[in-house]
Image (cartoon, coloured by chain):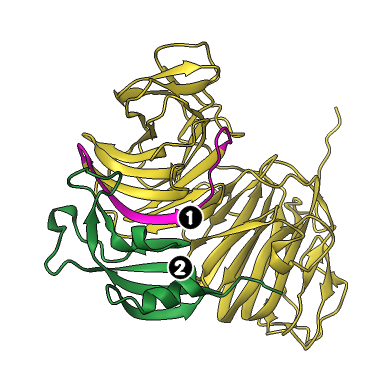
Amino acid sequence: MTIRAAIVTPWVEGGLAPGMPGSFKPMFHDDYTFIRWEDVTGQPIPNIMPDPNEYTLVAEMEQGVFDTLAADPDYEVLWSEEVEVPFAV
Amino acid sequence: LTIIVLTGAGKGTPQSYILYDQFTTADDAPITTPRSCEPGPGTLTVTQANNCFAISSGRLNVASGGGGFYGLIGAGVAREAGRMLMASLTKSSGNDLFPLAWANSNTISFPAFVNLDHGIYDGAAGLYTASSGPSYRVVGTNTVGTVGFAIILRASGCFVIDTTNQKLLWVDSAGNTATVYPAISQIGVAGYIDNFRIPIVKWTPTPVASDSFNRTNSASLGSTDGAGAEEVGGSGLAWTVVSGGMSISGNKVAQSAGVYSYATVNTGVASVVAQVVVNDSADTSAIQGLIMREASGTGWLCGVNPNADLNTIYEWAGGGSYTLRGSAAVTISGSQNYTITAILDGDVITSYVDGAALATYASAARNNTSTLHGIHGYNSTLTYDNFVVWNRTQTGVPNV
């Protein structure tokens, strides 16, 4: 089962590659296996990193990954739902 | 001198359609099958249960059939580039509906998108297009109100256009069944479909930029040749290698060793559907594909990260500032062709790899009026082929 969830995650440096200043990505990107994620906050780059360092993305992942994430104190899940498989008849 | 006058159904008017159903005369559920289209021409075979179809108020009234595939399907049509299947959809509830499909057999059942050459589907996660394979992807949000659609055949593949909002939703190269069948299918939705038709007139969008790179090896990229897609157009635009080194080699674009490179053309349009085929034998690069809306060394990078098996959207703020705005998992192997598709519509950017692995970002305000689009990457083992850009806005669909 695939879960879609809104997740609060910190930014970390190194958007394209480690050690590149001024490049950012969500910590979630490195910590968890995902199907996809999307930055839904849209903070302008000059405002990154914000204080507190947190923003929201919407991600899709397998149920087991989500269960681990939901129990991780470094993350906050705002909402979650099952992703319907289209025309699974 | 012989003058041949073609007329329709004895009415003395030019015949304009291969199939046309306005669903004019009321018909209670279950509707008559086979159904003679009104005003015609054409006949539709109806598969139905649970009173899922009725004709009232001059349109096909679709009610939830529940538990199976039901629909209407017409006679086979020879595949020709530019052949258009059109209809309007008004969805009132539910999420499972193929208001428009080219089936690849005389079959009205599309479980998991099989039996399709091309279709659109209003589903729980949004508006999908589906293609032979089968494969499918979200290309927009669910329909609201009455929306017209056209699925326009290519020799291989199709264009999907929202004719109400005049937007090119998807460009596909998959699916080339010689005989395809016009169909409406539903499984659990309520709504209305009207003006189901195949006009005689044929039409396809013309690229605003297109390059096959099929030319003599050269240290310069030269100009677009207008031959990167089936449809001729988009020639004569000069490539600018803005950074690094790129050359024509073996009818493709090759990169200089070990230096990040990118090149752009001025397409004249900011909101576009763009595609390029990339192939990298090394399978180690962090980024390669399309650079969109470039301006003074900033822009948007859409494409694959073979090293991490990802499709990514980076916001490039200049220099070494690359911020990841969206990503999707996709398996990338060395020496394989991958078609990168980027769709830019206002501040919304979506990126696909081979029509899947959707990555998206909806706050892409940077350079949102820039019309410079092109190709970018790092590895010297990387090649690019068949770069094509279409205008996202398509106003030329014939009003038929």
Q: Position of residue B10 (x, y in %)?
A: 85, 57
Chain letter belonging to callout 1: B
Chain letter belonging to callout 2: A
Q: Residue at x 18, y 47 (%)?
A: A22
Asked if residue B392 shows in the view, the reply is: no
| Quarter of the figure with the C terminus of chain A | bottom right
Q: Residue at x 56, y 27 (%)?
A: B227
Q: Which residues are magenta?
A: B318-337
Q: Is residue B203 above or below residue B244?
A: below
Which colour is chain A painted?
A: green
Q: What is the total number of numbered labels drawn onto the structure image? A: 2
Query: Does the magenta segment cover residue B271?
Result: no
On residue B329, the disc is 1
Q: Is residue B92 above or below residue B389?
A: below
Look at mark 2 in the image and give the residue it sits on.
Answer: A60
Q: Is residue A29 above or below residue A16?
A: below
Q: Which amino acid is tagged 2? A: Glu
Secondary structure at badge 2 equals strand
Furthest residue in direction left, as rendered: A51
